[in-house]
Image (tube, helix red, strand yellow):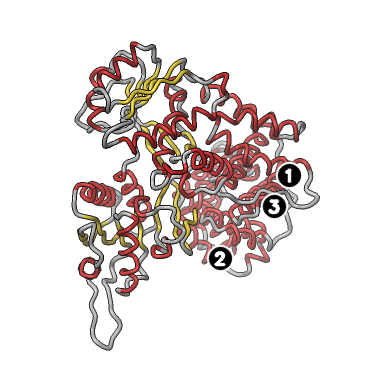
Amino acid sequence: MAAIRRRPWFVAALASILLGATAACSLVQAPAPAAQSEARALRLAHENKHADAARAYQELAVDPGNHDYFQLQSADQWVAAGNLAEAQRALSQVSADARKNLPILRALVAAELAVAENDGALALRELDQITPPTQADEAQNYWGLRGKSAFLAGRPAEGVRAYVERERWLSDPASIRTSRLDLYARVRAAAERGVSLKPPPKADAVVSGWLALGPVAVELARNPMRANAALAAWRQRFPQHPGADSVLAAEQTELVPATAFPDQIALLLPLSGRAEPIGTAVRDGFISAYLEQDAASRPHLRIYDVAAETVVSAYNRAIADGASFVVGPLTKEDVAAIAPLTAGRIAVLALNFLSDSVPAARNLYQFALLPEDEARIVARRVVAEGKLQGVAMAPSGEWGDRVLGAFTDELTRQGGTLLASGRYEAQRADFADIIKQVLQIHAVKGEPSTHRADAAFVFVAASPGAARQILPQLKFQYAGDVPVYSTSDSFEPDANANNDIDGMLFPDMPWMISSDAVTTQIRDAVRGAWPARTARRDRLFAFGFDAYRLVPMLRGKSFNDEGGIAGVTGRLRLDDHNRIRRELEWAQIKNGAPLAF
């Protein structure tokens, strides 16, 4: 299974066949054509040309005596190439006799395909068909797959045990460390999803330690200001744990740049006037992150109200007051006003994006919560799921123009097609005519209504109130079988109102939909400190919280380009234009509540 492993027998077979094929002066007889073809397939796989290797194995599968073996190898290579449809087709052509004649290979290939399709339960059923292998390379593959499958199936304790068992079959320290890092990532992901990591009865210290490391890992990723205390407590509980040196040593090293704040930060926000509620929410989220920092290491913080004076005046005053990093301002107009002043001065994290036509200095970073970005995320998701054609509804006005335009542009860019779109007035209550228009719904008296068959999705850009009107009417108009996607603007955490949008799929920030212990602790602390202000402005508090977290990473130029930052507004990455881009989590409303997936 070349995508995730290298079998010793694979390398040995390749070397043996290639040696025979190239021994032109040897008295050894040249390989038969079939052996030469297999050597070519092995070589292609070794060179990571997995699709070509898969096709080469398919050609070899015409041999009836070795049909199942080569079909399994072909399926294996299709998985490595990322073409799961072809892998499934190749596996479907393997005979039932393979479970008896090639039991280990059959089970491992089928389990790997199931893991690639995120079906952990199916993968475990495939692996249960065989006795755990005792040959080293097969055994480490078996236990590795079993560990991944168990985590996918929501059985983390079983997953940890499988990874621990896998180490017995690994021969070198580098492989063991890689396996432990993989286990660490899966325990952290389980903790982020809110999966219970309570150890089972009589679990040994190694298994219990890995499970207890999940919340610590989330703390390290999402709230490093508190991570040292969590790390110390874990080390005290599990002083001899194998994850302590191989995993946490590297993680603790990354804490240094994540918590190395400048001496003084200036925060520029509108704290009076029309934009006061928005500016205040961002400020309070920023301060809540500031208070997470150990008091002895907190930077000096000065806050400037850019509604009480011009933003240029506030910016210049902050520099004169000794700021070594500026966060803000918040509006596009204010960001554009200070952009020309920032070149060659201290770093600035603006809390909005400049227009593409406005040049930005190298030390000006931009961070924003834009609905257009979410619309593009939705477009990429529907195409990735194979839903290439659909329809959309958006409100009239500038906001609707931006969201629908971004969605349509990204959908087209990804190879999809928007079949029709409808615009509505935000205050209306009856959307029947627009729904009938975009979905071409026809109703004949005495017969069931029908809608266009070529629409694989409906994209709805809407406020929570409008979404609660539109989705029930979509179902009433007999279009309830078409999946509905939206942006996070359609969702607000109201336990009494979201039954009306049951089934809706949308991306959102962890702050809104994650149930992990760290995010819950931060969210509850903020809501407890400012209960009257958090209503309907939760995302702005999260925005302020992450803005504080970004300061040391940008100041020290230690942004992790590969993994980004696991913020409460999403996974944050810095692009080539100094803009912070967010990857969001996905949820579906079920029984009135968001269920992350």
Using the image, tell me which numbered label, if any, was put on residue 158.
3
Percent of width and height locating residue 466: 30, 59
Image location of residue 586, percent across then percent down: 44, 51
Q: Mark 1 or mark 3, which has the lower sequence index?
A: 3
In the displayed structure, 472 sits above or below 135; it is: below
Q: Quadrant of residue 503?
A: bottom left
SS type, badge 1: helix
Q: Is residue 456 above or below residue 281?
A: below
Mark 2–mark 3 Cα distance, whole angstroms, equals 30 Å
Q: Earlier in the sequence, mark 2 or mark 3?
A: 2
Q: Separation of disc 1 and disc 3 at Cα?
A: 9 Å
Q: Earlier in the sequence, mark 1 or mark 2?
A: 2
Relative placement, left or right, of 467 versus 86 is left
Q: Tag 3: residue type?
A: Glu
Q: Residues within 10 Å of mark 2 (few under 14, many from 20)?
A: some
What label does residue 207 carry, if any? 1
Q: Residue at x 19, y 54 (%)?
A: 396
* Left or right relative to 71: residue 352: left
Residue, x 73% and y 58% (percent of image)? 131
Residue to which mark 2 is pinned? 94
Amino acid type, callout 2: Val
Which residue is painted at 72% across and 31% down in the image?
Answer: 235
Asked if residue 316 shows in the view, the reply is yes
Amino acid identity at mark 1: Val
For marks 1 and 2, give the CA distance: 38 Å
**Mark 3 falls on what kind of element?**
helix
How many C-alpha atoms fall within 10 Å of the one at disc 1: few (<14), some, or many (≥20)? many
